[in-house]
Image (cartoon, coloured by chain):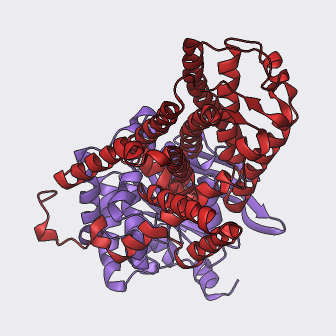
Chain colours: A purple, B red
Amino acid sequence: MTTIIDIHEVSKSFGGVVANEEVSMSVEKGGITGLIGPNGSGKTTLFNSIVGYHPIDHGSIRFEGEEISTLPVQKIARRGLLRTFQQTRIYGAMNCVENMLISMPHRKMSFFDAFSRNGEEDYDRADALLDFVGLYEKRFLRSGSLSFGQQKLLEFAMALMNEPTALLLDEPTAGINPTLINGLIDRLKRANTDFGITLFIIEHNMRVIMNMADKIYCLAHGRLLAEGTPEQIQNDQKVVDAYLGAH
Amino acid sequence: MNAKKALLYIIVLAATLAAPFLFPDFRTQLATLWLMIIVALTWDMTGGQMGYNSLGNIFFYGTGMYVAAVIAIGIVYNVGEYTDAAGGGRFEFTDAQYFSGMMLGIIGAGLFCALVAVVIGYLTFGLRGPYFAIGTLGVAIAAGELVSNWDWVGGGQGIALPVYPGDFDTGKLYFYYLFAATGVILFVFLRWLYATRFGAAINAIRDDEGKAEAMGVHTMRYKLTTWSMAAFFVGVVGGISAFQLIHFEPLETAYQTINLGIFMVVCVLLGGKGTLWGPIVGAILFHVFKEVTWNYLLGWQWVALGALIVVTVVYFQDGIMGWLIHRKPEWFGIRVEQKNLAVGTDE
């Protein structure tokens, strides 16, 4: 396997708060990589740095071998590196199908393509993906009127619609009904195997992440605390201590 | 398009063509109504569909007037000498010069405004929400002041254009149809545009610009294009207005921020932001309301107008179309679909 996202000694601080300090990790192409850590350990900051939300202070981030740490959000997204948000972000005034159609991969579109209508196959794809996440029946409702969990599923479907190479998911199961979580794990795995999308997932639910990831990184206080397979992480005393507050 | 919709469009088009003959005394009023519809529709392109509330669209109206006038005069005479005479002197225009100057002027006004919108947009689209509104308002006010101090285009006195060469009543009819044709073209254009991926992309910018960026949408490119297209049409009607009004000056007619500049926003709010018909319904109601109060409540007309704005903003925030969508969602296709009833998609 080859490395698709290569994070090398990345540091980011906000004023006096050091959110990430010399963090290095690598995400394997075609795999599922997990990122865990207690609240405030700098996981979302790292995601924001990767997708270009803010400049990093130090270090380098490479995507498919090319430096992306100096690029703005849109350009990174158009390279096929996408993220979903912890606080779900969808287009609330539009229905689910419209949300899906907007998420068409703009990187594969020229300026003049934008002046055409969506074709039959685009609608079919939107419907199929909405069906995939279980929102088919609600597809003509205003997405803002859906429950939080459903909005999360919609955001996930929108990300798939965009045909990304790699997808960064910020707590995909937070706020989702426990009975739905199994279904979501299954769908995430299928997105990885069937669509071949590399996943990099922040997750607090240990059962979920241990179930899915091939490799897990653990952050604490902005530093990399541990890395390894789910078994290694589960048995790592430092990780247990960090979560129980021994740090 | 189903038969019912087609019939509706045919009726509206017939009414448009017949209106000046049905109400011959109101030809100028009807032309102004079309002007209101056009500026409301173009304001809604950025304000309603894209979520950028501009208070400076009147800039393109005023600029359109000046560009059209300068082109129409400039192809026959020296503009500086013409404006120095301030409406006096002997500056004759043949019919051919008048009409060709007008057409070139109107189209030139549209193109010039479309270009300027890209430049101003590039500078102001970094601003969001109220800051964008105030920023664009500043551009319009500054432009009015600058032009009123620019003697080459007549300074504070403005420009007096040649009068329509034919019969007075025919002239009114002529300008009515110019406005109406522009309005119909704009409507057909927007009806098409809002159904394309482009329309969806600007709606995405309105609903969550950060999300649209994160999904790789070319937000700046779409914002500039939208504003540029809106500016084109406002510039065109500015150009038509210049010839219809014959004489115009910078602060009260061309860059009239507190009149037309605000009216277009009120029309859209009244009719419903972000809908195709909202700005049209709003413009008609607003224009009727304004003319009635200006005639029968003279002295209180601004008070009545202020009351209308307050009532709209407080009780009808989504406008008439928004209220309808809320009341009758099924008319607008908002429904829960049963899977087994759906026709062949994925199974």
Tell me which corner region of the image, top left, top right, bottom left or bottom right, holds residue B308: bottom right
Q: Residue A215, position in %: x, y?
A: 47, 63
Image point (11%, 57%), residue name: B344
Image point (66%, 32%), residue name: B246
State the count of labels: 0
Q: Looking at the picture, tell me which residue is in the foreground, B84 or A37.
A: B84
Q: Is residue A115 left or right of residue A18?
A: left
Image point (28%, 59%), residue name: A129
Q: Quadrant of the C terminus of chain A?
A: bottom right
Q: Residue A165, position in %: x, y?
A: 43, 48
Q: Looking at the picture, tell me which residue is in the foreground, B196 or A77.
A: B196
Where A78 sits versus A176, above or below? above
Q: Is residue B294 left or right of residue A176?
A: right
Evaluate whether residue B51 shows in this view: yes
Q: Looking at the picture, tell me which residue is in the foreground, B258 or A155.
A: B258
Q: Is residue A2 left or right of residue B144?
A: left
Tell me which corner region of the image, top left, top right, bottom left or bottom right, holds residue B52: bottom right
Image point (43%, 78%), residue name: A148
Where A80 sits versus B228, above or below? below
Q: Residue B151, position in %: x, y?
A: 87, 27
Where B300 sits versus A63, above or below? below
Evaluate whether residue B208 shows in this view: no
Q: Residue B324, position in %: x, y?
A: 38, 71
Q: Looking at the picture, tell me which residue is in the foreground, A243 or B287.
A: B287
